[in-house]
Image (cartoon, rainbow, N blue to C red):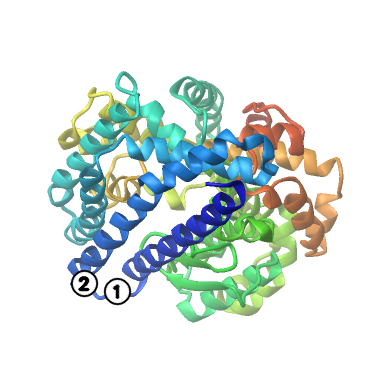
Amino acid sequence: MDLENARVAFDALQKKICAFNHATALIYFDGETSAPPDTIDNRTQTLQILNEEIFKLRTGDETMEILGFLDENRNLLSVRERRAVDFMLRDSKKKSSIPAKEYVQYENLLAEAQDAWHRAREEGDFEILSPYLEEVFDTVRRFAAYCGYKDNPYDCCLDNYEEGLDTKTCEELFDAVRSELTPLLHAITEKPQIDDSCIKGDFSAEDQENLAIYLMELIGLNLSRVGLATSEHPFTTFLGSHFDERIATRYSRKDFTTSLYTVLFEGGHVLYDMGQADNLAYTVLDGGVSMGLLESQGRFYENFVGRSRNFINYIFPEIVDLFPETLSNYTSEDLYRAVNKVEPGLIRIDADELTFNIHVMIRYELERAILNKELEVKDLPEAWNKKYKDYLGIDVTDNVNGVLQDIHWPFGAIGYFPAYVLGNAYAAQITNKMRENIDLEECIDEGNFKLINLWNKEHIWKHGGLYKAKEIMEKYVGVEFSPDAYISYIKDKYTEIYNL
């Protein structure tokens, strides 16, 4: 094998992997949005074949030969080529340690577990999901051992979503949540509560969709390449490359801000994806490098921008036009305070900016305990309910509003939850650095997202997977990771709102 042939083969291999991922993502998107309820077996049949091929492409002898040859000649490769080889070697070595038959069985299990999750929610019965969930956690634990994480399988899970992240770092992050944000929550609950009646009413899905489109265009999404759908659990799907994305939101007839902030959050994900350099398309470096960085962009547009007084002032006239019967007797300041109301609740995706971190911490503690065999899956509902009482002071009314509310575990995304709080911390640091270069508040006042998006693109988006998240934050954003900026942001903001 010569270098030029190896390069051509590696390029073709990456394109083929992207094509298969495109197909599986479309099947997933269909299953979560519009597929009829009794089509799971059909999708599973197709996914089994596709996942077998993906596994072969990532771990087969020909692939390992190409990667090995390029790695031996890495001094002759470009920066992008070296990183792509390293990126794929890391993934291929992990996957190749797993028996192919077990990997394919696991992918089929996840499709079945997601279907069981939907049925369990419909019937409010955790027992429908429990055996699938137990098998998912058992498999993840076994796969972690194959990859060399026998003593601490949770570190393997964390590393899958944020390279280098481990339990020790997570504990430092959540220690800050426990020690700083929990007392702040207690102080707020002793204050008179904010009136949020301006966001309550009867809002049609059509009007909320119009608001969603307005917001997507406002923040700079290219709607010729971004689709909008609805799903029980909102998400964003990356289809084959950063040239094609889908957002799935959820409309609540009683509260239009449910979709408003879902669209801003998922819109941040899409901006991150679509802002990546075009020469990364159809390579393993397309789609970003880190769930923490991905979540930071969602949280930046949802909270640091979307819940700011400046942003609410800007969009208020549009909201009044869409919902005049509800909003015409209120001011933008009323809306600002309403969307920043802090109130412990049952549902994570509906949580306010402060308590959201506690929702995530609960899930982090539970999934870590299960993987470390400190908690059994069958005892999850009881453990879940106890933590909600201990941390948030509320009683869980039923499993649908409790342990069955998230699809992450049936989807196999164990170790993902910490990325949400990590993303919050990243977002605070990114916002502070951005203010050193542009007048962020003036941009928001004018609805000018061009400068904001350009800054994010130059410092974060365009790099895709070229560098590790830590390298992007230190070299291109210009900060070393710390939760301090986020803690200060939350404390300052809510001290002012609640006059603490």
Relative height, residue 234 to residue 216 (above, below): above
Left or right? Give the position of 345 relative to 108.
Answer: right
Q: Residue at x 60, y 44 (%)?
A: 296
Q: Which mark is residue 35?
A: 1
Three-letter amino acid code at the position of disc 1 = Ala
Mark 2 near mark 1, Cβ–Cβ under 8 Å? yes
**Nearer to us in this view, 367 or 30:** 30
Q: For the residues marked 2 and 1, what is the alpha-carbon distance in whole angstroms?
A: 7 Å
Helix, strand, or loop for circle 2?
loop
Quadrant of res 423? top right
Three-letter amino acid code at the position of disc 2 = Thr
Quadrant of res 327? bottom right
**Nearer to us in this view, 448 or 464:** 464
Relative height, residue 202 to residue 277 (above, below): below
Residue 189 seen in this snapshot: yes
Q: Which mark is residue 201?
A: none
Screen quadrant of the C terminus = top right
Residue 390 seen in this snapshot: no
**Nearer to us in this view, 57 or 347:** 57
Helix, strand, or loop for circle 1?
loop
Q: Looking at the picture, how far across and down is residue 132, in whole percent?
A: 17, 47
Q: Which mark is residue 39?
A: 2
Q: Going by the picture, which residue comes out furthest to the front?
A: 1
Left or right? Give the position of 2 relative to 380.
Answer: right
Q: Looking at the picture, how far across and down is residue 32, in whole percent?
A: 34, 66
**Nearer to us in this view, 176 or 422:** 422
Quadrant of res 310? bottom right
Mark 1, Cα crowd under 10 Å, few <14 / some 14-19 / many 20+, is some
